[in-house]
Image: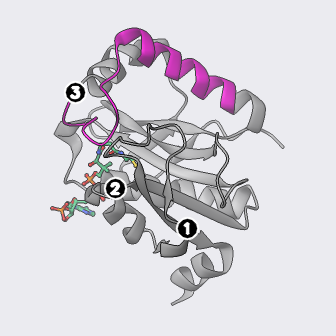
Amino acid sequence: MEPILQLESARLVMRQFRDEDLADFAAMSADPQVMRYFPAPLSRLESAALIGRVRGHFAEHGYGLWALERKDNGAFIGFTGLGVVGFDAPFTPAVEIGWRLAREHWGLGYASEAAWTALRCGFDRLGLKQVVAFATRANEPSQKVMQAIGMHHDPDGDFAHPRLASDDPLRDHVLYRITREQWLQTLHG
Ligand SMILES: CC(C)(COP(=O)(O)OP(=O)(O)OC[C@H]1O[C@@H](n2cnc3c(N)ncnc32)[C@H](O)[C@@H]1OP(=O)(O)O)[C@@H](O)C(=O)NCCC(=O)NCCS
């Protein structure tokens, strides 16, 4: 299958990361507010490495985290996309959906708009049967995006993130799911 390099929503172009995005991406990922539900903000080097991993994921799987560009002003505002879950858990193997936006672009519906577009791509074009999402339990803004795109909390799937230390307060994660059938129901009422 041809890689899905670009998607479009009403207000966003969802495209490949460009080298020129690094400054804005690194600034976003160094913002303690943006990263408050993660172990630590990222250094510029860590952000550059993450862009490298995103490109590698596209090369391997043909989809991944798309950089988000606002159509109205061309600004890079973050990422949203699909990824193969990179650790073992009772719900893996699975494809997850995720997002991160720069703070000045929160509260405008861009994350949900991009998430909806990525989810549709997963079911319509990639033929996925199910998509999962997870976040540390306290991350309510992220769970609101999950709910906005029709995902359901699966309490039986909640898990301790294996990449976090056992005494890390962020370790406790909630699991959300949506199946292709559930997604079709949200489309057709
Ligand atoms: C999670 C995150 C992407 C959510 O961003 P967001 O802007 O709150 O999410 P949405 O795009 O769904 O926007 C919803 C908000 O925009 C408002 N809004 C304004 N215009 C809107 C529109 N046209 N359509 C939809 N919502 C709109 C909604 O009322 C809602 O506001 P509220 O949060 O006060 O209820 C953001 O908080 C973030 O980047 N966090 C840091 C990274 C992170 O934690 N990522 C997830 C890890 S699991």
Badge 2 marks a residue whose secondary structure is helix
- Near-viewer residue (74 or 171): 171
As drawn, the label of residue 44 is none
Is label 3 in contact with label 2 (beta carbons under 8 Å)?
no
Label 2 near ligand 1 (CB < 8 Å): yes
- The residue drawn where x is 44% and y is 68% is 149
Location of the N terminus (image quadrant): top right
Q: Residue at x 26, y 33 (%)?
A: 73
Q: Position of residue 52 (x, y in %)?
A: 58, 18
Residue that badge 2 annotates: 142
Left or right for 75, reference 158: left
Disc 1 and disc 3 in contact, CB within 8 angstroms: no
Quadrant observed for ligand 1 in the rendered image: bottom left
Packing grade of label 1 (10 A; few <14, some 14-19, many >=20) is some
Q: What is the residue that sits farthest to the bottom in this orientation?
A: 189
Amino acid bearing label 2: Ser
| 17 is higher (above) or lower (below) than 103 | above
Mark 1–mark 2 Cα distance, whole angstroms, equals 17 Å
- Indicate which label's residue lies in the foreground, 1 or 3: 1
Residue denoted by label 1? 157
Identity, as a three-letter code, of the amino acid under mark 3: Asp
Q: Report the residue that reaches farthest toward the front.
A: 167
**Which numbered tag is attached to residue 31?**
3
- Residue lying farthest top? 45
Q: Is residue 115 magenta?
A: no
Which residue: 22% across, 27% down?
31
What's the residue type where badge 1 is placed?
Answer: Gly
Q: Write the start and end of the magenta stretch as one range.
A: 32-57
Query: Quick check: 87 above or below 45?
Result: below
Label whose residue precedes the other's in the sequence (3 or 2): 3
